[in-house]
């Protein structure tokens, strides 16, 4: 490559390379665990976005967009279309704008909005998508009804979410770490969040009135050798995720010591030679034409 071309993206640069380069460029100012986790999983996100049946001209809404980790690759996937990401968290939206700018995208915008009252006219989008959103809804139907209202007849609603019941780890986490993970799951459930929502998406979509509902599973295997930088970073992110959830040790029957010991064990187990499998559930349904 000639000296003058240095720093310019190669013509053949893939979506994945482009996104990872943007994450690296924007990294210095981003500290939230959600941002760091999104950066770690960017390659898997792009693979999932690339697998979607989607016209390059599609108008897409991403509900609960957070730091734009799902909206930005979607926008890269619809270069002739348009993506709007909405969230109620202004700080996350600011990070989403920085990510889109780092990629150099002009076909994505972010707006503050509540999913239960979307500020769009009926039938405004070809696809209304969400990722890791329904796990945060105590009652998923108000948001889903809004998503159905703003998608056009014949368009799709898509949800990607987790189900911890389909995850596995080898070696199994040591007992102190397993106790913290179980306390975290109970805490999340008490807050009205559901880390086992994946298996329920089919039922939720049907109750929301969508037709032709299909749920696919998308395996995310991770294997790591001890001491790899990625494993170290993932361990730190996991600790922050649990801490930031506001987990109250006493309310979950753990002493502060047990919580700290469990978190330390969890971090150590992530840094060891290990295999982990997380499974994403990908639900897609169609809005029928009325009448
Ligand atoms: C775990 S984050 C997922 C972010 C992003 N979709 C991703 O895949 O990285 C969930 C997001 O949903 C947002 N959220 C939850 N309930 C919401 C609501 N009722 N209206 C708007 N945003 C909401 C939260 O603010 C948060 O940013």
Image (cartoon, rainbow, N blue to C red):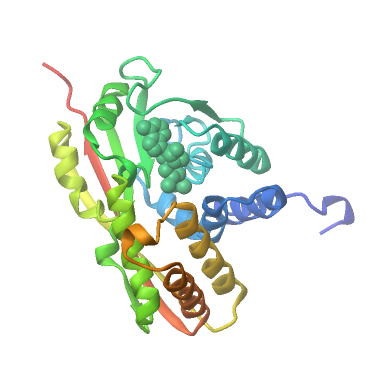
Image quadrant of ligand 1? top left
Quadrant for the N terminus in the image: bottom right
Tell whether 49 sits left or right of 166: right
Is the residue 242 above or below the residue 55 in the image? below
Q: Is residue 147 left or right of residue 99?
A: left
Indicate whether 35 appears above or below 274. above
Q: Can you tell which quarter of the image residue 231 is in?
A: bottom right
Q: Residue at x 25, y 51 (%)?
A: 197
In this rendering, position of residue 68 left or right of residue 1: left
The answer to whether one can see residue 279 in this image is: no
Residues 162 and 193: in front is 193
The front one of 213 and 232 is 232
Residue 109 visible in this rendered orientation of the protein:
yes
User: Most extreme residue toward the left, as rendered?
Assistant: 291
Q: Quadrant of the C terminus?
A: top left
Which residue sits at x=23%, y=36%?
A: 139
Residue occupying image coordinates x 59% and y 78%: 228
Residue 278 higher or lower than 89, as above or below: below
Q: Residue at x 55, y 39 (%)?
A: 92
Residue 102's spot in the image, x, y percent?
67, 42
Question: x and y percent of residue 4 in the render?
Answer: 88, 50
């Amino acid at each position: 490559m000639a000296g003058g071309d240095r720093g310019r993206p190669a013509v053949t640069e893939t979506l994945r390379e482009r996104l990872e380069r943007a994450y690296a460029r924007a990294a210095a100012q981003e500290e939230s665990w959600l941002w760091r986790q999104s950066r770690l999983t960017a390659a898997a996100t792009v693979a999932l976005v690339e697998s979607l049946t989607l016209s390059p001209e599609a108008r897409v809404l991403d509900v609960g967009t957070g730091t734009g980790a799902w909206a930005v690759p979607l926008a890269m996937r619809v270069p002739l279309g348009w993506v709007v990401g909405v969230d109620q968290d202004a700080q996350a939206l600011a990070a989403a704008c920085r990510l889109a700018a780092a990629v150099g995208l002009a076909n994505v915008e972010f707006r503050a909005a509540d999913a239960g009252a979307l500020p769009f006219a009926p039938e405004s989008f070809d696809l209304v998508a969400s990722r890791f959103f329904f796990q945060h809804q105590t009652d998923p139907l108000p948001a889903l009804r809004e998503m159905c209202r703003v998608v056009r007849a014949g368009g799709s609603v898509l949800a990607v979410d987790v189900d911890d019941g389909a995850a596995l780890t080898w070696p199994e986490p040591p007992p102190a770490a397993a106790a913290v993970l179980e306390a975290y799951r109970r805490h999340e459930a008490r807050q009205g969040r559901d880390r086992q929502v994946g298996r329920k998406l089919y039922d939720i979509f049907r109750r929301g009135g969508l037709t032709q509902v299909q749920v696919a599973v998308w395996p995310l295997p991770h294997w790591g050798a001890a001491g790899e930088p990625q494993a170290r970073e993932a361990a730190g992110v996991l600790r922050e995720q649990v801490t930031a959830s506001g987990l109250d040790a006493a309310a979950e029957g753990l002493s502060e010591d047990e919580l700290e010991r469990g978190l330390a064990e969890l971090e150590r187990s992530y840094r060891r030679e290990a295999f982990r499998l997380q499974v994403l559930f990908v639900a897609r349904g169609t809005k029928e034409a009325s009448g």
